[in-house]
Image (cartoon, coloured by chain):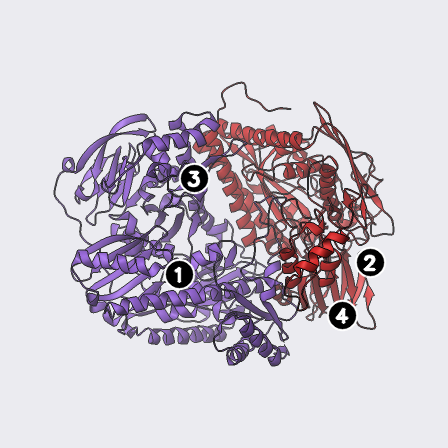
Chain colours: A purple, B red
Amino acid sequence: MNAPTDATKMRYAVAVDTGGTFTDVSLFDRQTGRNWTAKAPSTPDDPSMGFMDGIGLALEQAELTPGDLAQVFHGTTVATNLILEGKGAKVALVTTAGFKHVLEIGRQDIPRKVNLFAWVKPKRPVPPEQVFEVPERLDRDGTVLQALDEQAVRETARELRAQGIQAVAVCFLHSFTEPKHERRARAIILEEHPDALVSLSSEVLRVFREYERSMATALNVYVMQAVTQYVANLQQRLADTGTAAPLLIMKSNGGVVSAPEVQRVPAHTALSGPAAGVVGARFVGGAAGYEDVIGIDIGGTSADICLVKDGQYTVSGNGRVGEWPLSFPMLDIHTVGTGGGSIARVTKDGALTVGPASAGAVPGPACYGRGGGEATVTDAHLLLGHIPPYLLGGGMQLDVEAAKHAMAEHVAQPLGLEVEAAARGVIAISNNDMVGAIRVISIERGHDPRDFALVAFGGAGPLHGVALAELLGARTVIIPPHPGVLSALGLLVSQLRTDYARTCLQAPPDYNVAQIAATFGELEAEAEAWFERENVPPSARKLSRFASLRYRHQGFELRLPWAGEIVDGGSVDATLEAFHLLHEQLYTFAQRDTPVEIVTLHMVAEGHFDQIEPAEWPSGGSLSDAVMDHLPVSLAGGRQEVPVYDRMKLAAGTHFSGPGLVVQLDSTALIPEGHQVSCDRFGNMIVAIGDKD
Amino acid sequence: MEAGYMAEPVCDAVTLDVLLGALRATQGEMEALIERTAMSPFIREKKDFFVALFDPDGDLIVGAYRPSAGDPVRPIFGHYPRQTMRPGDLYWYNDCYGSLGSVSHSPDQVFLAPVFSNDQLLGFAQSWAHFADIGGMRPGSISPDCVDIFQEGIIVPPVRLAREGEVNEELLRTFFRNSRFPELIKGDTRACLAALRLGERRIIELAERFRAEVVADGFRQLTARSERAAKARLRAIIPTGRYHFTDEIEQDGQGNGPFRIAMELRVDEDKVVLDLTGSDDQAPGPINYLLNPAVPRAMLGMYLLAGDPTLPLNTGAGRAIDEVILRDGSLLQPRWPAPLGQRGLTMMRLISATMGLVNAAGGESTAANCPYVIYFARGLDPDGIPFLLTDGVGVGYGARPFADGIDAVYYIAQENYPVELMEHTFPVRLRSYGINRDSGGPGRWRGGCGVVREIEILAETATIAIRIDGASSPAWGVGGGINGGSGRAIVNPGRPDERELDPLSDGNELRRGDLLRLETGGGGGWGHPFDRETEKVLADVRGGFVSRAVAEEHYGVLLTGDGLAVDEAATQNFRAGNRPVVDGLFHRHGYRDQLT
């Protein structure tokens, strides 16, 4: 197999983003900058079929064969869906004797925003009868208090083999400090049960807090077999077509790795799909001249929100997937269950809610005429004229009457409103939910959303982008040339990336500079070994140091770049100073009278592909050529006729003012009045948000 | 008072829900700030803090879902009339008697910021947190040994902590000087104050976005909506009449007891009255619960709103009860300066008693929760530095007509200390931590199980205070469900020096190598255990929640020899011939209609 980065000289790269409804493909010619996009229906039973169909369609357009491909990039939701739908493997957890119910007890809390009389504790992915206790015990510093009972491990392994349980997670107390008991346990399990897939907590997530670490390890092995099989299928299908292009898969941290790395820790792909969108938003923003952007990816069932500051995205270690904590390095993506298919309902006490229930692709919104009887966000847009009554270039007619009926029955009548007012209400509620999500990743992280340009993408992003900017006070909205396939573009422009971290507790006044340097050295060695495995040439390697710090007695650390190229007293002081400043920025106060502890050191390893240049968009042609229709649209000032523009005919350099609709194959953009649109040389529509008054 | 509108509302239906979403987001932001910046493990890890937003009259609009908030804004008004407040002011207290029970033990600090937009008072932002130590008789401030409130730490009456942004540092220095762990509570105070500023900013932004009068009207409607819903539910489940429920607390930690909590609910055509005057006199020990009338209202309101997550639990929800009658000098309205520090167990009993009242009135409600367990360990760590471990230990909650009770839970939204955190932070080692088998009351729906937690002491000595309620009067079952199991604390189980601790006591001296084993109780069961699906019983046995013996004895479920399957034929046969007769609505050591 070709090494991925050696292949950067080759011409064609293809990216496949598998979503719930569609598989989006983007094919790119590195030499000419030309790119082709394709959409194939997703095939949830075997996603590799939709994957291959999509690639086939793109190759057909470009008149190429699989043999022309240099790399295949992929974003997947296989792991996410297994976790969210509770459909992973039967897993056994091996734990320290005395702590069998670590998953059942969890953190013993009822979530803050639920009613205790109504809340039911969610069923764990590993039931307690599949948790096996093994005598062993480490002290907090890793000293052995009780040796590993090897015989007990052996008997457990035999029992697992007898029960036919292959997926095995091992998590012992304090193994994040000293992993030797876990490693020995794995060796014994594999001796007795060679078919077992074993995940060690010290390898999956080497941080403290046993519930969170146990859960991450269990979820990793929960999805391992399916993800491994899926990746192997893709590789086989690719090989069958005669391509030698390596398969590179997006991880939750926004970087890609080769297939074997994904098979080692498959839970790292839990946010693979949305992460690709973040990378795409950063790329589009950067090309348009915006280093600070908020990405808003609105699909059928949810909106994924992310933030890019100074061209960098934020990696968080406190993520969740569904009900479960998953403390891996993940891009800070906040998901809210509001998308085009989200259903609007009125509770019996008169509250209007939108989502998280969704009409999905089938039956879909009422206006799709496939039997969906409930009112969705898409129906509301249709009734307000935000989308023309036809979709996909005239290929599909939308049923306005069905939308009206659904909106009247489920929203307007219960609230005592006119249908149009009800539709406006549905849009207002969904916008509000998205604003809440945007606040979480901006304001809660100390960023003012008014300082950011919004990149609106996903099929429904361009319908909401300008309204969200108005609500947030943002000044600019960027609508990329192909909003529906931006995630695929994100895959194309991604880098190889792996994050390494180790706990290295340093308390003042004696910061041990030598120990810090040694720990960074160990992380660097791990990273270099990975570079070798991925065949990244030295010139394409990049290492960045980070550290997580906190005030003494705090329970939450802030992660920030290590200040300085080397590790010495000066760089320690500079890092501490940067911590005080960041704490003040995020939380309004610094505590310079309080000692600061260094808790975790991180190394981010990136292997850089040659950067792709965005394709130039055709220029010339007049605005009037792009006007294809006039339609009545309900806006703040009432219903009015507005021009409908064909996106493909909006040439680079074109300017126009709202109101207007811009339609294209994969999306419709709504530009209310008062805002100025200009098309840049890459085909982005840059919307300058007008003042409110 | 019915909240209706003659005129067209200023805040339309959609804006109202937008406003609610924004207020809940604000609550989330404030909580995140406290969690990430606070310093005592009790706040940052266990999360014993709450935030809330209030209207200008002091009515709660949106806040954490908990049934123990009193009426925390109005106590300020007596000292600082609203017209004297200015933007940038901060107010603070922990004075239980001075706030008429709005806080009910002194470690809880209430911080409030009035919020103004163009000189108009829009409302208040509040943060509330349990501080680890504020002085008093022993480390941790509250002890079962306290005989008056002065022994439970420094008392801060409602004071103005900041005037127009200028913080009164002298006041804070005085407060910090009274703590054994000033560094922790200094950080916690900063976190709470920063959260207030954040809440203040968010409300002002809302007023700028929607106009102040729209926000004000939205606040009114949000309370009115919850009020309408709560009243309608109450009328739907409880017919007119008089209903009684009485339970008792075994002891006050100082050799006195039992103490009865007696509730009477009078539902007339036009008025609903909750009368608690039949409860016993106040206790010499610190189990007294200085009850603000808003508290029992919220307890019932929370239950009434359980079906609809879109309704905020606010002052409106409490208006399903028109009047609460209390008796001075009683357990629920003690006279100054009676000690209050252990009121948590009385509060938990009162929540369950409120559900008992609903059951007695014919509403199919939940079985009783087991009151949560807490212990304090204090001493010197091996480096000679004083430590204070305050560890909240989960219990089981009552089963419900639609689901099992919650296993291993502590009040609401309060987390445990991970084992690895315990061992890194305190001179202890955990020997085990798991589900307390058979502690959940058997029923069609099983009561939640408590836990077993074994703590080995690594300090030279540690003085232990412990609070376990329900040793002889466990959580009751209902509708055929059996009572939950009891809790207990044993030192050195299985060794020659094994001893059981008084469940509500302080001054228990443990030495290095001693093992403290806590077994906490479970919730009551709901419905007849013979009606529970056999596969659920099997899963409970295999998961370590129910023993085989209890599966047979209480559930009538017989397993195959290897214990891996149900012997369905034998079970059917056994269940048909041995079904116990239910001859009382409640169950505690046998079926009965009255518990006391």
Disc 3 to disc 2, C-alpha distance: 56 Å
Q: Residues within 10 Å of mark 3 (few under 14, many from 20)?
A: many
Q: Residues within 10 Å of mark 4 (few under 14, many from 20)?
A: many
Badge 2 is on which residue?
B502
Residue sitting at 66 percent across and 40 percent down? B69
What subunit carries mark 2? B
Indicate the quadrant containing the C terminus of chain A: top left, top right, bottom left or bottom right: top left
User: Label 3 is placed on what type of residue?
Assistant: Ile
Question: In the image, is B511 to the left or to the right of A170?
Answer: right
Is residue B406 at least partly visible in the picture? yes
Of badges 1 and 3, nearer the viewer stands 3
What subunit carries mark 1? A
Of badges 3 and 4, nearer the viewer stands 3
Disc 1 to disc 2, C-alpha distance: 52 Å
| Residue A253 disc label | 1
Q: Position of residue A66 (x, y in %)?
A: 21, 65
Badge 3 is on which residue?
A343
Badge 4 is on which residue?
B514
Q: Position of residue A342 (x, y in %)?
A: 41, 41
Disc 2 to disc 4, C-alpha distance: 17 Å
Indicate the quadrant containing the N terminus of chain A: top left, top right, bottom left or bottom right: bottom left
